[in-house]
Amino acid sequence: MDRDLIEQASPESTGPGPTDPRPLLLLVADNRTGTAAIQLMLREQGYGVLLLPAEADALAAFHQWNPDGLILDVAHPYGAALAACRKIKSDPSSWSVPALVLCARVDPVTLEAAGRAGAEELMSKPFSCNALLDTVQRLVGWPVPPQRVGPRPGPSL
């Protein structure tokens, strides 16, 4: 892995470390636009998040960090993020790690490509923060329910 990627994916920047019980997610993105917001929201809920560009060696990152879940933000069904998922999921040590695909369009081609890549779930963009949190919690199996994201209640009169 290159130096920038290692700095970006250091344990200090992700939250959970080897002895921390919080789940660690590997977020692989075809396009980083909007992905930072997903990363921030998940971190605010207590998840550790390693953000990798799709062209990075996701399999090496998977083995280095041993994440609890994969999130793949795909631009199209033939993009590098699904290829990274396919590469990771072809390794038997990854079979129990759930993969969630986030995509702009859910159609038969995307559904088939996500299934062939080994993804357990597919979410269409745009999605609500709460829907994403619920899905991640269900897939990763973290026992602590995430905080709800939304407007804060105003003062009661």
Image (cartoon, rainbow, N blue to C red):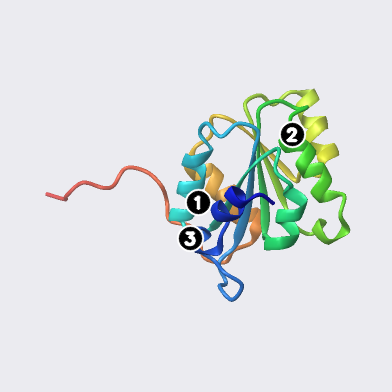
Is residue 33 shown to the viewer in this render?
A: yes
In the rendering, at what x and y percent does residue 84 appear?
Answer: 76, 42
Pick whichever, 138 or 52, lies toward us.
52
Q: Are marks 3 and 1 in contact (CB under 8 Å)?
A: no
Q: Residue at x 82, y 56 (%)?
A: 95
Mark 3 lies on residue: 46
**Callout 3: 10 Å neighbours few (<14), some, many (20+)?**
some
In the rendering, at what x and y percent does residue 87 appear?
Answer: 83, 45
Mark 1 and mark 2 lie on one chain; the one further toward the N terminus is: 1
Q: Is residue 77 left or right of residue 46?
A: right
Mark 2 vs mark 3, foreground winner is: 2
Q: Are marks 1 and 2 in contact (CB under 8 Å)?
A: no
Numbered-mark total:
3
Find residue 109 and report its image quarter.
Answer: top right
In the rendering, at what x and y percent does residue 22 appear?
Answer: 55, 67
**Callout 2: 10 Å neighbours few (<14), some, many (20+)?**
many
Mark 1 lies on residue: 42
What kind of element bears circle 2? Answer: helix
Q: Residue at x 68, y 38 (%)?
A: 54
Mark 2 lies on residue: 80
Outermost left residue? 157
Q: CA distance from mark 3 to mark 1?
A: 7 Å
Is residue 74 placed above or below 45 in the rendered structure?
Answer: above
**Callout 1: 10 Å neighbours few (<14), some, many (20+)?**
some
Q: Residue at x 56, y 50 (%)?
A: 134
What kind of element bears circle 3? Answer: loop
Three-letter code, disc 2: Ala
